Image (spheres, rainbow, N blue to C red):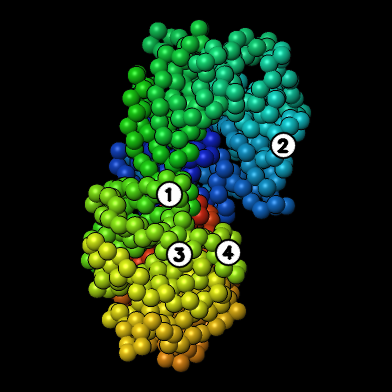
Amino acid sequence: MSGTVDALPLEGVIGFSGKIKQALILHPNDQHIIYPLGSTIVIKNVENTDDQVYLQGHTDRVTCMAITRDGNTLASGQITHMGYLAEIILWDISGLHKESPSPPELIVRLKLHKVMVQALDFSCNGQFLASIGGPDDNNLVIWNVATAQAICGSPAAHDSCLTVKWMNNDPQKLVTGGLKALRMWSLDTEGRKVRPMEVSTSKEVRTYTCIAISDDDAILYCGTTTGDVLAISSEKKQLITSGPPKGKTPRCGVQAICVVKRVDGMDELLVGSGDGELMIIDTETFQPRVVQSVLGAVTSIAMDTAGEFFFAGTDKSNTYLVQYEGLVAELKTTGHAEMVNDVVFPQGYSDLFATCAGSDIRIWHSDTLSELLRVQVPNQECNCIAFSPRGDGIVSGWNDGKIRSFLPQSGGLQFVINEAHRLTGVGNSSGGVVPSNGVTSICPSNDSKRLLSGGADGQVRVWAISKGTQVMIASMKEHKGPVYAISIKADDTECVSASADGSCITWSLADAAPFVRINALFAANFFKSVVYHPDESQLLTCGTDRKITYWDVNNMNAIRIIDGSETADVNSLHVNANGHFFVSGGADKKVNLWNYDEGSKYYEGVGHSGTINTVRISPDEKRIITVGTEGGIFVWKIPDSFAAAA
């Protein structure tokens, strides 16, 4: 390894961790939107989407965020492994206001809660921060922001606590809500105590998911999992009323709530439900005034200061810009909500790329990172995709054992090969954490006339593809485990397949004796990826043994073995066009850029919060795209000096 490893610069991200409550925050300057993606926090300019800043300090996915009223300080909490303390990070983002913006800075890390931070909120003057631990911790802790010290703490409730909110005018009082418990707390900074008072809701027993407080602190509006909103008097600590009436309640519970002041001074409630409804509720009659539907459960609402527009985030990773009057919703950004299995570029064309996750295949524009096309096959999962070299189709392998090909512009179905592979695997069907079923790898030949596919059944099959017919020419069965990768030579005469049974086999495709094994290599390893070096004299493999191995194609001897990761599996490799460098990614969440001949690592990219499934170098060799289990698509810039040396 080389002495110093530099940070790989992050150029852009696609995605939004929409399952986190109140994850979308609009900065008080109404210009920047802040949201988490895995362990990265993205600060994006609303007017100019190219202007993005990434906060990278968390070691695992972010679970909650809060911002001060003046917009100078951001707090974010994360989840971590059992038995460890989860961090809260305070960020100084005051530079966003200025004429010449300065980058955000990490101020301090706060550690007290076990395993997970559930919720955060700043007091009205920004002096105190309240944090709640997850189910394993369940403590309420009050922090002094200036000194970064914990003032006091207390068990938040007898059962799990889910949300915390400070009063709008009194920096000594706050409210927490959770399973069957709503409590108001008074903070005594002199005595370093925080004292709870139970709120009486008479016979109404609810689980509270979110709380909004009227401007004068008189009334608490509490959203519940049953879909009704409880109005509570903060002075008497008693239930005043609840609504909407039966039959009109938001379905699947209230997930987000916000108090909006009308022109005539009356309060209205803006509510987001678990069924994708946005609703404006009158606070006097508790009748819904306007209802609008969006895709996915509404988990966050970010209102602008004027009360005219707001951003809504859903658990399907969509964000909407909504006009408050009439609730006119416009889809702003989209992303994958499930783990992304594969990413691929068309041959020799860098302006767009395709990803597959769950039942979706999506095509993205490389520069604007906007979605151009979406193809869905309901209730199935897409394991792998590839563009045909001519660019006239997107071939994909699915967990129902079928190969489907789609037209690249319209997304229309071109053909389906039924029962291309058996549904379930053989031997150790998983070869990893998540079992793969059906078609697990796919590779078109360079003349676009044939298609190679590998399945969970251990078979490698060759298909003759034409416009009207798709015929199986050969089925090569030697692998005892799922075939995770297939790579083909430039002249289509040979291919190599890598399997979880610990073998890679090179197959003849064109000689006098086609479709037989030429050679094989074996290792104590679930192979996850195999690629040819561009001169086709060497192979590069990786897998669960954490090593990246160079093999001689002729005699299948290992030439060089390097440590691809110190801690976890290496899942994916991609070599550039002239073989000068390659990129790897795996379960240690890092993207590594290597010099091929030296076998030394030059750059390391940190940003993913889950396992990296696939890495790809763009054909123009300016960027690397990586996808992972958190649903994020990360775009990294290949440093010019490194690319020029190639």
Amino acid type at circle 2 is Asn
Q: Which residue is denoted by mark 2 in the rendering?
A: 139
Amino acid type at circle 4 is Ser
Q: Are marks 3 and 2 in contact (CB under 8 Å)?
A: no
Q: Are marks 4 and 1 in contact (CB under 8 Å)?
A: no
Amino acid type at circle 3 is His
Q: Work out whether mark 2 precedes mark 4 in sequence or the reverse, and give the earlier one.
A: 2
- Give the quarter of the image for residue 389: bottom left
Q: Are marks 2 and 4 in contact (CB under 8 Å)?
A: no
For the point 39% across and 23% down, which residue is it? 292
Q: Name the secondary structure under disc 3.
A: loop
Q: Which residue is denoted by mark 4 in the rendering?
A: 430
Q: Work out whether mark 3 precedes mark 2 in sequence or the reverse, and give the earlier one.
A: 2
Q: Name the secondary structure under disc 2.
A: strand
For the point 47% across and 57% down, which residue is it? 399
Structural distance between the alpha carbons of marks 2 and 4? 39 Å
Q: Which residue is denoted by mark 1 in the rendering?
A: 359
Q: Name the secondary structure under disc 4.
A: loop
Left/right placement of residue 268 relative to residue 180 reads: left
Q: Is residue 29 visible?
A: no
Q: Which residue is denoted by mark 3 in the rendering?
A: 421
